[in-house]
Amino acid sequence: MTVDAYQLLNKSFRKEVVYKIGMSAGFFSEYNSMILSMLYSLEHKIRFKLCSGPTNFHPEGWNGFFLPFCEQVEDSSGHYKTCDWKYALKQMVRDGRFSAYKSLLPYLSPTGKELKTQEVFGRSRDPHRAKKKYYIPELGINGNIQEACSKLIETTWRYNEKTQKSIDGLKASVNISGNYIGFHIRWGDKSIEHKPYPAEAYFAKVADTETKKTFVASDDYRAVDAVRRLRPGWEVYTLEREDERDFSYAGFLHQPEEARQEQLLRLFASVDLLSQSQQFIGTYSSNLGMYVGMRNAKICTGVDYDSWRLNW
């Protein structure tokens, strides 16, 4: 799918949503949500526009790292709502009442010509959508949700010139070639949401025993050390730094802007290398694992689940 084809179809819709990315969550949580919202918008003939203001991942917004792919409009708080829908839903279930129903309305009933971010966000992540087939012939989409989202990733995951130069340099510094296994070992604060898995669990999923080369991405350098201990004969490559331990997203946000940008560039380069591996092994419960499962589903193996899932 080309950007031109996407823009042509997108601009043909009358109803529209102004979507705000980079509000509060980690980058891949935000990005995955955007891709799912784009798919929902295409399916329901809603013109997708992006809010152009600063984000939590770059002061210049989307264009700080990537090339534009759709119309962008000036940032405004009127373009999105904040709604603690998970809390509201829990209250409804716990109390057996519907007093929290109004808090969920932005997710349940998108109306009007111009929608807000959350009016599309909630519906785009309905678990039932993971079981559907998608057919948008103008964009070459004809398959399941992962196949549909892979087309949208092709359209949006395009670095701007400055970012591309940095990514090329980082990937060249790794100097990995040929067949290799890609590991994403998520430890750090992910343990709050899901139990962490030891490095042994990742090796247990390796399909090709002939390959003895791996690229490791992690939020904790001890995972890289663990891989090297377990397979001393393997070639182990990484872009992680030895002083990186016990990652927390809250701590990341308190770092200086320059440090955050540097970490994100290494993350992007790592994700590119993981997506180009012969086999990616990670956790589908992590947003990075969810992303690679959309970008290149054929190479993916889950440690936590047997198949890709639409997670929150």
Image: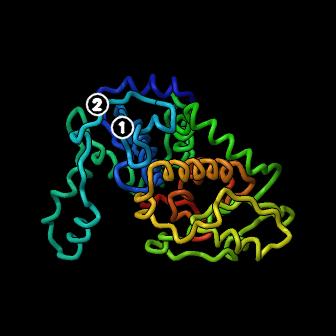
Q: Which residue is mark 1?
A: 44
- Kind of residue indicated by mark 1: His
Instruction: Give the residue at x 81% y 53%.
Output: 179
- Nearest the viewer among 309 and 236 is 236
- Nearest the viewer among 185 and 40 is 185
Residue count near mark 1 (Cα–Cα under 10 Å), binned few <14, some 14–19, many ≥20 = few
Q: Position of residue 295 (x, y in %)?
A: 59, 47
Task: Evaluate whether residue 246 shows in this view.
Answer: yes
- Nearest the viewer among 2 and 164 is 164
Residue 279, quarter of the rendered image: bottom right
Q: Is residue 202 left or right of residue 247?
A: right
Foreground tag (1 vs 2) = 2
Q: Is residue 4 left or right of residue 230?
A: left
Q: Position of residue 174 (x, y in %)?
A: 74, 51
Image disc number at residue 15? 2
Can you say which quadrant of the picture contains the N terminus?
A: top right
Mark 1 to mark 2: distance in Å? 9 Å
Residue 79, quarter of the rendered image: top left
Considering only vertical position in the picture, is 280 above or below 248?
above
Instruction: Give the residue at x 47% y 50%.
Output: 32
Q: Position of residue 2 (x, y in %)?
A: 56, 28
Considering only vertical position in the picture, is 146 above or below 90?
above
Instruction: Give the residue at x 55% y 49%.
Output: 262
Q: Position of residue 232 (x, y in %)?
A: 82, 73
- Kind of residue indicated by mark 2: Lys
Q: Is residue 152 left or right of residue 211?
A: left
Element type where label 1 sits in the image: loop
Does label 1 or label 2 sit earlier along the sequence? 2
Residue count near mark 2 (Cα–Cα under 10 Å), binned few <14, some 14–19, many ≥20 = some
Give the farthest residue toward the left.
99
CB under 8 Å between callouts 1 and 2? yes
